[in-house]
Structures are given as C-alpha cells and as structure tokens.
Image (cartoon, rainbow, N blue to C red):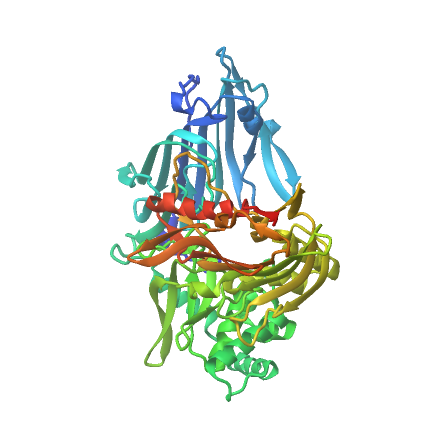
Amino acid sequence: MRILFAFFLLLSASLSHGQSFTRLEWTAKPVMIPVDEEFAGDAAVMVAEKKTVEFVIEKEGFFVYNTVHRIVHINNDKGIEYFNKVYLPYTRGLDVVDVKARTLLPDGKVMVFDEKNIKEITEDDNVYKIFALDGLTRGCQIEYYYTVKKYASLFGREVMLGRFSVMNGEFQLIAPPHLRFEVKSFNGLPNATEKLVGEKRVISVSSGKMKSGEEEKYSKPDANSKRVEYKLSYNTSNNERQRLFTWNELSKKVFESFGSFNDKEKKKLKELLEDAGVSDKMNTEEKIIRIESYIKKNFMYRDDISDDDADDLVGVIKSKLCSERAINKLFSTSMTVAGIDHHIVLTGDREDFSIDPKFENWNNADNVLLYFPQTNKYLAPTASIFRYPWIPPTWAGGNGVFCVTTTIGTLTTAIAEVKPIPFEAYEHSFLNMNMKVKMDEKQEALVIDVKQLYGGYSAPNYKAPFVFYPPDEQKNFLKELIKFGTNSENILTSGFENKELDQKDPYSPFVISATVKSTQLIEHAGDKIIFKVGELIGQQVEMYETGERVADMDLDYPHALVRTIEFQIPESYEIKNLKDLDMGHVYKENGELTMGFVSSYTLSGNLLKILIKEDYVRVHYPLSQYADFKKVINAAADFNKVALVLQKK
C-alpha cells in the first residue's frame, strides 16, 4: 500500500529559519586508489561509495537531499561498457541540484565532465537523464556524484551492495537535531552510530568491504540485500517522549481511510450486496466468496487514478472504475455492511521487504489483505487472479500489521497487532501429473494420456491465461504446458476442469487433460528401445555447483508434487534397468519431513507403475541445510535424466 497520508509534524517556528544542505566538496586533484587483490577479477569495483540522505527545513518547506558519491575503478571492457554512461534519477517532483564527474586515466591525466553534456532520453516509455564518460580505459578511475532534492519522506531505505563490489561503503543520514531518526542495518551490515556535528544530527553506517556475487538459485536477492532502513521516530521540539509513526498510528489511519462510510455510501453498498446476490441466509464464507467474485468481476482499479476517489464510494460504485485505495475501501466496507467481521491487514512482500515488528518502516506495508477471524483465512482485494482463501504467496509467510477494531464509548478505531500471516496447508498447493503411457502399433511413438493438476497457490497463474487471453494465445499456452514433459505439441484431444477463477470449492484443482502423441521420448538401438521416462516430469532445476553458498534458500510457497506414470510395456519386451527408478533424498527434523524427493516403482505383469513424490513443507531453509536441499533438488534433476532400456525377450 502506498502511504496515503501527509504528515506535517514540524513546529511552525522551526520552519521560520531556513537551513542549507551539506554540499559535497571533493579533493582538487584525484589520486589513484589501489584495488585490493580480491576484486581484481571484477569488471569494476567501487573503491569508495557514500550515500547521504539529508533532511533540511527551508522557508519553502521540508526537503530531503540525496547525494550519491562514487569512485569506481575500471578493470576490463565490461566495466567500461557499463560505466561509459551514468544514469541520473529523474522523476516528477525531483530536482537534480548538483552533478560532477571526472576520470583519472592510468597515465595521470584527468578528464573533467561538462554538465552541458547531460542528456534526456526515453527508453521503454521511461524518461532518464544520462551523461557520458568518454575516453574510459582499463585501469582508469572514475569519480562522480550527484545530489537530488525532493519533498521529504519520513521513511526510506538504501541498498548498500548492488551489482559491483564495494571496498569502502558508507551511509549517512543528516537531520536537524530535534528530529530523531532511527536507522537499522540488515543482512550483516554494522549497526549505526550517532553524533551531533554543529547544529546537525549525523547517523552513520560504515559497511567496509562487500563482495558482490552471482544471484543464487532459490534466493531472494532484494530481501537478502545489505541495506539500511530509516524512519523518523521523535520530534523533540514537540514531545521528546512521544514515539512517532508507530504501527498503532498506522493502524488507526488505515481504519479511518478504509473502514469508514457515510449514510449515502451505506445505502449504495447495500444495493451492491443485493446485486451480488448476498443474502442473510448465507454463512460467512459464502458471503465472502460472493462479494469477492462480484467486485473482482465488475470493478477495475488503476494506478493512474487519484486516491481521492475513495472519499466518494457512491461515485466509485457508479463508475466501476477506481484507485487502489478505493478498491480496498470498497472491499472492507462491503464486508462491514454484510455483517462480516474482518480486520484490515498490511503486509510486505517476501520478495523484497517485510514488516519488522520493532522497526516501523511504513514503506514496507505495501499490500492490503482482509483477515476473517471466523474462518481464520485471508482475501487480497487488489490481486485480481486470486480468490479467497488464496492470496499472493509472497504476501504470506512474513509479518502483517493487523488493524484490530476496537470501540471505546461511541468511538470505533483500530489498534495494531503485528503477527505472522500463515500459509494454507502445504498439501493444498501442488503441481501434480498423472500419465498413462503406451507405444503405438508401430512402436515409433508414445501415446500419452496426461492430466496436469494445479492446486492452491499454484493454480491462479496457470488459470489466468485461459480466462484473459484471446483464443489463439490460449491455444499456444496450452501447447507449452502439455509440451512440458511430453516433448510434443501433437495434441490429439484436450479438456479442462475448474478453469474459472471462481470456484464453489476454492480447493478444487485446475485440471488440464490431454492425449498426446510423442516421438521425442523413445529411441531405437538395435533390438533395444530407449524410453526417456525421466523427461516426463519436465526439465528440473539443477544445483550441481560446488561453490560456496551465501544466502539461505527461500521458496515462494510450501507445496507438494506427486507424479504417477503408468507404462504399458510391449508384450515382447522387458525392462533391464528398473532399479534406476529407485532414487531420492529426504530431510527430516525431529522425525518430521521438511523436504524430500522420492521415486519408486511396482511391476505387475506388463504394467509398470512409477510414483514420484516431492515435498517442500517450508518456504525458508537455513544455509546449514544447503547440502540436503541441494540433494533434494538434484534428485529431481537426476530422475529427469533416467532412461529405461527395453530389450526384446
């Protein structure tokens, strides 16, 4: 959720005397900084990088100046290619107030950048300002900084390690002394230090050396990034003990924004419920499902619509077009008028930044859910392809700010309760396959009856194309799904079950059935037939790398995968290597399975039955379990390579 509220907490007396930001001054003559040996193989390295966020009270208002100062050593041609153009931030309401750049060549020559060379370009409908650094060579050192000015936001974050390694990194937050900001370090960065320098409060974090690396499989690089976050916590000129921007304050503001409505709006909401077919005879869950289905089918929200429309639900219900704030309010107030007890829940996203109970960075409360205490389940108003109780899975598994309503006298408000948002049971989320395989009469192809079953968090993304795509694109998408495992687009028949987003039973799986003829899975070798049975489960992720792992392992959601394969062995053949089907690795904690891959088989006459079970009960596996995690992943990849040898009797 975007922060919807403007806060003016500074005393008017404080605004009466203007201040100035700390303008960066660099040395008159640059000096070549030696690169540590461990970074010599990098394309480029930040030998020094400093990011400064300075809050300044001026006569015109309250502003923040963001300065980025980098000294970069170029090691090879890739580094030259990346840094020969420098992109400057350029968004509405942002003013570039200072830019300088220069290049120190290996022979000692200094090339100074001319600000007149800043150009504005458009790429992919986005506008950028760039400046070119000409004459870069291997072994040169470039130095540049820029300062941008914008209206202050009282929450923020700075990522300290990006694409390139850093030899010496620093973050600095500067503010007037009566504004007490808090800064928190994440993922191994040192804690912040604080001091008064003249009439300014300075908070610093020095990172030291930071080695960049390749993105690792099953990791969430944004969430694991070395970063600092900050927020304004006290204004001592107002009340030095009153903590600002608490979760309770946010909860109260959200309830006021999403939970309130007037008599005219209530009347219109009742009409909406009638149109949706909601009746008092329904139980709570039936009402929730009916309301969600009606709103998501009949209303559209867009990012480019002003949030002010939420103040007029009558107009929103009439137009059926609304902002993100309005759609959230429409859901919440509809539930209230229908008599459904619910809490508004604010949450982050495990892909990037999550809710920290003790550090109230409101910028991390990006997403809105509704929680229903009576059913203990959730609904995501803005997630158009998800239906109760399924929500975007990366919105679960972390903390949420539950806005719990409370009434004191005649006043109804909300207080915050920060607690985890659980997943639905992992067995309900699956990508299962049932396959019956036989050879055609000429033994030149396989005829495969396949069922692909998608359940829980897995289903919406597979359903959506068959709901929203035009027929030709649906057909192509179906081919791609069926081709996964069968290696063939030769679909003889196909059909669907439960492909609509709305289902009476939200746990009903989405099923694709098809009969396919495939020539890609068998090969003839003399009197033998090679049946590439492992490829029926589709290509698998491989983790055979031997390098040192850095990040924990994280999945989008807990899930199970069950694949069954029934193969009718031709009468005149037998399989010579059935034991190759027995494989796998499981990991248990306290006797309970947390992850595993196991394949097994039974043979009854000429009917071979193969059972493959793969389970990931959790979404987070610590680095200490990497060896076992890798064995599970690679067991699936190893099975994908299994080929059965059929030999004539």
Q: In this view, does 613 lie above or below 39?
A: below
Left or right of 182, for residue 162: right
Regarding residue 255, the answer to whether it shows in the image is yes
Q: Where is residue 337 in the image (x, y as percent from the top left)?
A: 49, 81
Q: Nearer the viewer, residue 633 or 348?
A: 633
Q: Residue furthest bottom?
A: 281
Left or right of 592, for residue 516: right
Q: Quadrant of residue 530?
A: top right
Q: Where is residue 366 in the image (x, y as percent from the top left)?
A: 46, 57
Counting the numbered discs, the total is 0
Regarding residue 60, the answer to whether it shows in the image is no
Left or right of 3, for residue 295: right
Q: Nearer the viewer, residue 24 or 171?
A: 171
Q: Position of residue 128 (x, y in %)?
A: 60, 39
Q: Residue at x 60, y 72 (%)?
A: 316
Q: Residue furthest top?
A: 107
Q: Which of 315 and 464 is in front in this view?
A: 464
Q: Nearer the viewer, residue 237 or 248?
A: 248
Q: Where is residue 222 in the image (x, y as percent from the top left)?
A: 45, 45
Q: Which residue lies furthest to the left in this view?
A: 241
